[in-house]
Amino acid sequence: MTDKPRQKVLVARRHFLGIEEPLLREAGFDPIVGPGAWYEDTSYSARELAELARDCAAILVSPWDVVDAEVIAACPLLQAVVCPVIGVDQIDQDTATRAGVLVCNSPTLSNFIGVAEATVGLIVALMKQLKRNEAELRGGGWYKVSNRGDMMLGRTIGLVGLGRIARETGRRLQGWGLKLIGHDPYVAADAVRDVGIEVVSMERLLQDSDVVSLHVVLTRETRNLLGVNEIRKMKRGAYIVNTARGGVIDEAALAEALNDGHIAGAALDVFENERLEAESPLRRVDPRRLILTPHIIGHDRNVEEPGFRLAVKTIASILAGNTPETVVNRAAIDRWRARFWS
């Protein structure tokens, strides 16, 4: 009697930790490792990725590899595309759902609590005018009345999107004497009441908030969620924090609002195009008004390993016929079961 062949799993890019391949072998799979490295700038074409994944039952994909309709159609054995971080907007979820392919992320503590901690830090840095005062001192100056920050007590923080990160941000702001409001059409008011967040309309959130902090995934619905009209509805002198996805803000509109003083300051860890291009209007904004970080602000030194371990656990669960909690496109589950497990 011959042993059943080991299912193939594509590791799209080799990570410097080197744990993904042995973890998959230990779980009983045959890992196929792509030629790319995790933090390199080059990306696969759809044809290249499809060729790598053609005989694979799952793909362990990096945040930079686009899994589109062409890739999914070329892989008849594909059951799952799993990312070892939270963001999965590089995967065509609509096509995957129609094909019965599960899309999963890896929401480890580092990935959502780390971002929540960073969000609080950015809010404080903006409202206390950290960059402005540091620039003054480093430029040879000293105390200026015009560089005083804002008292946070009694201010209103508006959280757009009320998932894990927003809720953890709210928990960390409890006890500060702030008013927390939030908007998310897919979250009931009862779900965030224990965090002290009042659910309101987007219109009211924009009008009432002293700080608007974004915590949404990038979809057709959320692209340019903060455009010209929405930014101009905000209070003059308010602040914006974005640790979610760059495409949810119209960056040119934000740059204009920062330059004319309608928005007092902003902190961005994510951008429409990453890396942030040299000609971006954000680079021409007074740096004392704008904190820019390279999509790293929520990461701790050990962020990757838990994500890879969870991703491999997710793959093993799916390829054993089980449905993990990390499935993002849950509408695909019935089709996946019908295709592979009926």
Image: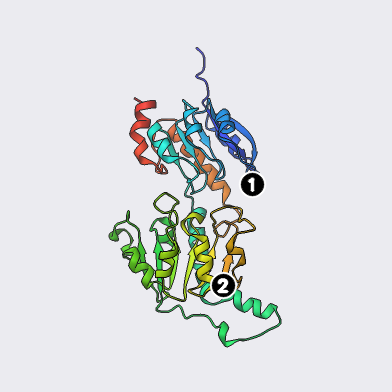
Residue 302 drawn at (x, y percent): 59, 52
Mark number displayed over residue 176: none
Residue 223 drawn at (x, y percent): 44, 53
In which quadrant of the rendered view does residue 22 lie? top right
Earlier residue among tags 1 and 2: 1
Instruction: For residue 148, say whether it is visible.
Output: yes
Residue at (55% x, 83% y) in the render: 148
Q: Amino acid at mark 1?
A: Tyr
In which quadrant of the rendered image does the C terminus lie? top left
Residue 210 drawn at (x, y percent): 43, 73
Q: Amino acid at mark 2?
A: Arg
Look at the image and name its color scheme. rainbow
Q: Secondary structure at mark 2?
A: loop
Residue 277, placed above or below residue 99: below
Give the label, 1 or 2, closer to the camera: 2
Residue 276 drawn at (x, y percent): 60, 56
Disc 1/disc 2 C-alpha distance (Å): 29 Å
Residue at (39% x, 79% y) in the render: 154
Q: Is residue 179 left or right of residue 218?
A: left
Mark number displayed over residue 289: 2
Q: Secondary structure at mark 1?
A: loop
In which quadrant of the rendered view does residue 330 lie? top left
Q: Nearer the viewer, residue 94 or 294?
A: 94
Q: Nearer the viewer, residue 208 or 39?
A: 208
Residue at (64% x, 44% y) in the render: 17
Dot 2 crowding, Cα within 10 Å, few <14, some 14–19, many 20+: many
Q: Which residue is mark 1?
A: 39
